[in-house]
Image: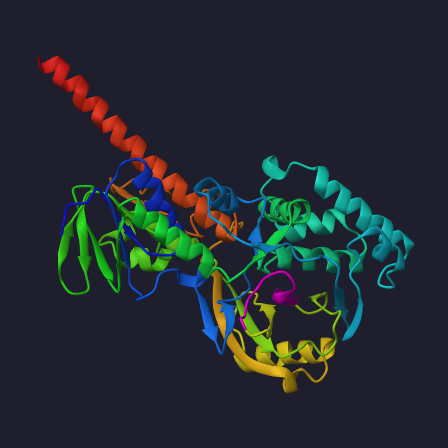
Amino acid sequence: MKKIDVAVIGGGLAGLIAAIELARAGKSVRVLEKSGKLGGRAMTVDKNGALFNLGGHALYLGGEANRVFERYGLKLTGSKPSAKGLTIWNNTLSPLPGDPVALLSSKLLGWSGKAKLMSIMVKMMRADFASMPNISLREWAESQIGDPMVRHIFYSLCRTATYTTDPDYQAAGPVLRQVKSSLTSGVKYLDGGWQSIIDQLRDSAISLGVDIVPGTTVVEIKHDRGKVQGVVYASGDTVPVDTVISTAPPATTYLMVKGAENTILQRWKDEARPATVASLDLALKRLPVANRHFAMGLDQPVFFSDHSRAAKLSENGTIVVHLTKYNGPGPQDAEADESLLKQTMSLLHPGWEREVVSRQYLPHITVVHDYPHLGRTKNETGPEIPEIQGMYVAGDWASHGEMLADASAASAVRAAESIVRAANAANNRATAEGILAR
């Protein structure tokens, strides 16, 4: 196999973006993906003609991922879903107070609550949360929002924007920035699902000369005297390379490095707080209640969205809808979660069972392997491993305050830029030493 400058472990969003960035900078790159298919959790599966993402996926139009995709010239069709919808409280549906008309007519809130909700929304839209103190989301909410129902609505917005419910540990600043981004720029549902992103990233990487090797598991990142030496495949083959980016989860990356307990990887592994959801996707012949496209739970951490209202996700006219139950910390009950999602669907669309063409239930899918939280020693993870020259990390957990796919994209760009800077610095040193030698 030809010699390469950089090995990228993982062929998901972060791995493909890192590979493209490096190839654009003139580096030879090999992407090593253990699965037979690229994409990771950004894959889309076809079930009886319906396209299901692996969990709820929305592209945040004001985020880093979308900026990267626009810079690459990706053609991502689809549209922004309407924010008009319903809330679920005590098994009862009410209009979501998401615009002035719905707010004024809402029976969830009294006049003081309506005024407070409006005040909080205005404050969030105008504020710059970059310099916020490192406090929990709950601490911020309890200090700013006295009305209990307004707090329920606020927490529901935070769950929906971050796909996470852990207010006692979530860092308030990053969550509030994410909510602000979702409210100001909105999101897009993609025609063809997120596979449309992966396919275009793959094609772009290949056109730049990136060597993509699916079905290849890396079991070790070899290093000696503080420098990367190569990667070892499950087959036992060793490929020499002096620069590696791991986009694997923190625990998996830790296991690939002998002596990782003596590196920063130990801390990242121990401090990580993964976020998971129970996800139910349905392809329906029709919606039993035609105008119910979107709903947010207030007293239960549930969410419903008709993705087909904004994106083409089937060739046969079936309607693809998505339901999520956001999992908090601790053990989860897969059967109870599925029952809750079915009950939510029955509340919104009675008789939905008769319309099902295909379904997908993912009881415990990881949304992110870590997110900005108070348990971190430092709020920035990666890209360098200080103890091992030539080793870098990227992925949704290698965040500097970004969330979800934005963290994957931003961390991939950071890792590539750091590698290019290191290579340029080494070249400059070599040139200076050559001049001195003469």
* Residue 50 is covered by the magenta coloring: no
Nearest the viewer among 141 and 320 is 320
Position of residue 208 in the picture relative to residue 120 (left or right): left
Q: From the image, which quarter does the C terminus lie in? A: top left
Rendered image coloring scheme: rainbow
Nearest the viewer among 291 and 186 is 291
Q: Residue furthest front?
A: 316
Residue drawn at (19%, 64%) of the image: 234
Q: Residue furthest left?
A: 438
Q: Residue furthest bottom?
A: 354
Estimate the x, y position of residue 357 in percent, counting from the top left: 56, 82
* Residue 313 is covered by the magenta coloring: yes
Position of residue 84 in the picture relative to residue 278 (left or right): right
The span shown in magenta is 304-315
Where, by quadrant of the figure, is residue 302 drawn? bottom right
Estimate the x, y position of residue 212 in percent, counting from the top left: 27, 55
